[in-house]
């Protein structure tokens, strides 16, 4: 949010949406580069929608954004029962991992959880991005091993899309 030049909006606006007092369009933020962003989406998906019994309303409002080229829902690490419908309704799923062994293990576990909880025909195309990469070669090798494991043991496709280099200035 901060790197994109977006100031976080008031979380209260999300709560007002969940209470039925605002429409989703009312709480989207227009960015300088033309993107509309919904901040605090992870709060709405993982906590708020269930608390106020507004899960169906949130999904309906998101579907109204169909005129958008892309709708990006940033979810926290891991899979929850609340996040599954959003994953299953997606065309693409981008999984971001770092090259350390724990993160790779968690990434595999998350993909495994998705394959166990989502009908095969609803699993979105899944793509891998390696963050904090030390080199293109090491990230490519790691990605190939993860792709092979996902294909062999989960019978799913995982496509490596690239790496984001490690930058000591960004911590």
Image (tube, rainbow, N blue to C red):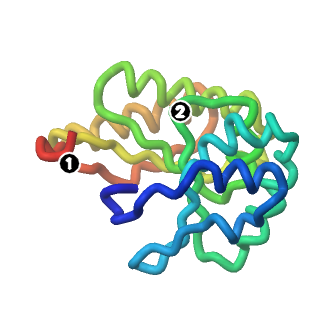
Pick whichever of labels 2 and 1 is earlier in the sequence.
Answer: 2
Q: Secondary structure at mark 2?
A: helix
Q: Position of residue 155 (x, y in %)?
A: 63, 34
Residue placed most toward the observer, 98 or 48? 48
- Could you say which quadrant of the image residue 69 lies in? bottom right
Q: Position of residue 82 (x, y in %)?
A: 74, 36
Of circles 2 and 1, which is in front? 1
Residue placed most toward the observer, 108 or 43? 43
Number of residue marks: 2
Residue placed most toward the observer, 21 or 80? 21
**Gap in Å between the C-alphas at discs 2 and 1?**
24 Å
Q: Residues within 10 Å of mark 1 (few under 14, many from 20)?
A: some
Query: Which quadrant would the N terminus be assigned to in this image?
Result: bottom left
Which residue is rendered at x = 44% and y = 22% of the image? 105
Query: Is 160 placed left or right of 25 in the picture?
Result: left
Pointer 1 residue: 165
Q: Residues within 10 Å of mark 2 (few under 14, many from 20)?
A: some
Kindly identify which numbered label has been placed on residue 150: 2
- Could you say which quadrant of the image residue 156 lies in? top right
């Amino acid at each position: 949010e901060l790197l994109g030049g977006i100031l976080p909006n008031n979380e209260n606006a999300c709560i007002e949406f969940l209470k039925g007092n605002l429409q989703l369009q009312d709480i989207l933020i227009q960015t300088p580069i033309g993107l509309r962003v919904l901040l605090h989406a992870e709060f709405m998906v993982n906590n708020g929608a269930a608390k106020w019994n507004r899960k169906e309303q949130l999904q309906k409002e998101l579907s109204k954004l169909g005129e958008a080229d892309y709708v990006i829902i940033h979810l926290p690490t891991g899979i929850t029962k609340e996040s599954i419908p959003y994953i299953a309704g997606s065309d693409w799923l981008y999984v971001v991992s770092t090259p350390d062994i724990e993160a790779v293990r968690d990434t595999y576990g998350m993909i495994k959880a998705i394959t166990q909880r989502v009908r095969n025909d609803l699993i979105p195309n899944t793509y891998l991005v390696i963050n904090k990469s030390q080199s293109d070669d090491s990230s490519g090798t790691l990605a190939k091993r993860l792709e092979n494991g996902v294909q062999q043991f989960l019978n799913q496709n995982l496509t490596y899309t690239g790496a984001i280099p490690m930058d000591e200035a960004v911590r």
